[in-house]
Each structure stands twice: as C-alpha cells, then as structure tokens.
Image: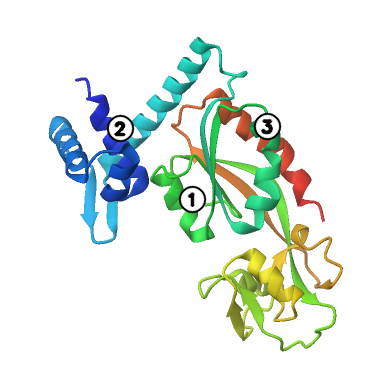
C-alpha cells in the first residue's frame, strides 16, 4: 500500500502543530481541506491517528508510529536531494530543532553548535526554551528532534547521551546578606531550590518563594537584590556583584541529550550529536 504524500504532509503538520487551524495556515490550505486529508488518511490505513480535544489534538499510538516514519522519510529525502544537487555542504543541510531548559540553551547549546550553523546556509534551525517538565512531550510528539534534560529519564525508545555536567550553587547579592531573603524560582512547579537543599541534607526546609519566569529573570532578580536563588554556576561566574554561598556538598546535574532511537540519523544529526559531546562542556566552565 502506497500512502498519498499530500495526506502524509497534512498528518505531519497537524502532528507537530497539535492544532488543525495552525497546521492549515502552515500548509496554506483551508482547515476543512486539511481535515479532509487527515480523515482520508485515517480511512486509508484504517486506524485513528489523532484524539481531538478542546485544547488541540494528541497522537494515538498508531499516530506516533506514523510520525516516526514520516520524520525519517523526510530526513532521508532532504539529505538525498541535497547530495544530488551538490548543495549538501558535507551533509550539513536540513531542519534542526533543539529544545532545552533556559539555563543551558542560550549559554551552552547554541554556542556549542555555532561551528555547524556557521558552515552552511542550508540548515533551518529552530531552538526552543521550555520548562524541564515540558521537554519530553516535545520529543515524543515530534516538535523537537533533540532535547536536553538535567537527568537521566526512563524514556523508552530514546537514546541518551551525556554531554556535560552542570554545577548548581546558591547565589546572593553581595550587599543583601539577609538569610531570610526570598528565594527566586521560575514558577510554583519549579523544584530546583528544594532539590538543592535536599542534596545538602536539608530536605525539610520552609522557604518563601517568588517567581521570575525563567533563569534570566531569576538572575536579574538576584542582581537587583530582590532575592536569592539556586542557579547554574557557569551563568554567574562573571557577575561581580553576586556571591556564592558555600555548602559542604557540591551539587551537579548531568546534561543529557535525548533523541529517538529509531530515528534516521542524517549526516547533520550525527554531527550535532558529536559536536555537543565534544563542545558542550567548554561552556559549562565556571
């Protein structure tokens, strides 16, 4: 059975957009036309690919399998066409989507990949800064080709590669030494501060917290004397107005790169993996 390519494209766009309206806009077709293509595809392969809900769509298990197939097919097609046309730049072509948490995306991942991105204009790259809890779903649903977490997760069917080690420290403005000063976190679900104190054997601490959205908001808050925070050491190493509070135990987290184990690794993807393994640690130095 040969699957219609237009229907596959419609399926893929809905899968990564999680929304029919957004997908229709991306494909420059009407939403009814898009819905019809997806419906015909589901009829053609005799299975349900999406579960529709008020907040968008989610993939069924069959949908996830088809997404994996489409993603690999697209990667191989782009690589072959680039080689045929002579524009492959040593394999550096195609789309690259990397998602990571705010502490390391701008400071580590992006500069580590600079040599690759500088080498070719045929790479379309998308970087996503997200909360840690949101990253695994981005990989599962195809929104990202790679994600970076600060721990080894039990995700099934994904390869995991350690690319560095991130030291976590207690930071405070030098002129604001009140031990009862509030702690700054991303949001109410951010457990970074509690995890740090638990690692120091202080698991039952009671803290007053305020929320500053992402790591750069947190660091700006510390610089302005609004509070103290648990942050990545490499982000504050050159900030003279911030001091590090010493503790008995060094706390560090691994930087772990995740990608689909069944994914076709283009030359670009393989180079991304190798480059992050070799270069990410350079940008984690205090």
Dot 2: element: helix
Q: CA distance from mark 1 to mark 3?
A: 34 Å
Direction right: furthest residue: 240
Q: Where the N terminus falls, by quadrant?
A: top left
Q: Where the C terminus falls, by quadrant?
A: bottom right
Please state which of the two labelled residues, at mark 1 or mark 3, is closer to the viewer: 3
Q: In front: 72, or 110?
A: 110
Q: Position of residue 186 (x, y in %)?
A: 58, 70
Dot 1: element: loop
Q: Residue at x 27, y 52 (%)?
A: 57
Please state which of the two labelled residues, at mark 2 or mark 1, is closer to the viewer: 2
Residue receiving disc 3 = 118
Q: Residues within 10 Å of mark 1 (few under 14, many from 20)?
A: few
Dot 3: element: helix
Q: Could you say which disc has been placed on residue 154 in the image?
A: 1
Q: CA distance from mark 2 to mark 1?
A: 31 Å
Q: CA distance from mark 2 to mark 3?
A: 29 Å
Q: Taking 23 as reference, is 82 above or below it?
A: above
Q: How many marks?
A: 3
Q: In front: 252, or 32?
A: 32
> Considering only order in the chain, which callout, 3 or 1, is on the residue closer to the N terminus?
3
Residue receiving disc 2 = 9
Q: Position of residue 176 (x, y in %)?
A: 80, 84
> Considering only order in the chain, which callout, 3 or 2, is on the residue closer to the N terminus?
2
């Amino acid at each position: 059975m040969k699957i219609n390519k237009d229907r596959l494209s419609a399926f893929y766009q809905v899968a990564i957009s999680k929304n029919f309206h957004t997908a229709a806009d991306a494909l420059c077709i009407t939403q009814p036309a898009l819905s019809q293509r997806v419906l015909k595809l589901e009829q053609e392969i005799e299975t349900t690919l999406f579960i529709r809900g008020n907040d968008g769509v989610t993939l069924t298990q069959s949908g996830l399998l088809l997404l994996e197939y489409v993603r690999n097919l697209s990667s191989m097609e782009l690589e072959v066409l680039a080689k045929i046309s002579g524009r492959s730049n040593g394999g550096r072509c195609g789309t690259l989507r990397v998602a990571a948490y705010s502490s390391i995306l701008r400071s580590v991942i992006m500069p580590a990949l600079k040599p690759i991105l500088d080498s070719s204009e045929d790479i379309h790259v998308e970087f996503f800064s997200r909360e840690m809890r949101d990253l695994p779903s981005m990989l599962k649903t195809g929104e990202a080709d790679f994600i970076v977490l600060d721990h080894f997760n039990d995700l099934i069917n994904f390869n995991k590669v350690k690319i560095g080690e991130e030291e976590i420290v207690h930071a405070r403005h030098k002129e604001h030494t009140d031990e009862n000063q509030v702690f700054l976190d991303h949001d109410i679900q951010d457990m970074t501060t509690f995890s740090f104190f638990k690692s120091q054997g202080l698991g039952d601490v009671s803290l007053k917290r305020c929320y500053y959205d992402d790591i750069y908001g947190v660091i700006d808050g510390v610089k302005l004397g609004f509070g103290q925070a648990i942050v990545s050491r490499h982000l504050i190493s050159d900030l003279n107005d911030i001091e590090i509070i010493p503790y008995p135990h060094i706390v560090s987290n691994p930087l772990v790169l995740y990608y689909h184990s069944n994914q076709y690794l283009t030359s670009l993807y393989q180079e991304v993996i190798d480059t992050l393994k070799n270069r990410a640690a350079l940008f984690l130095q205090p």
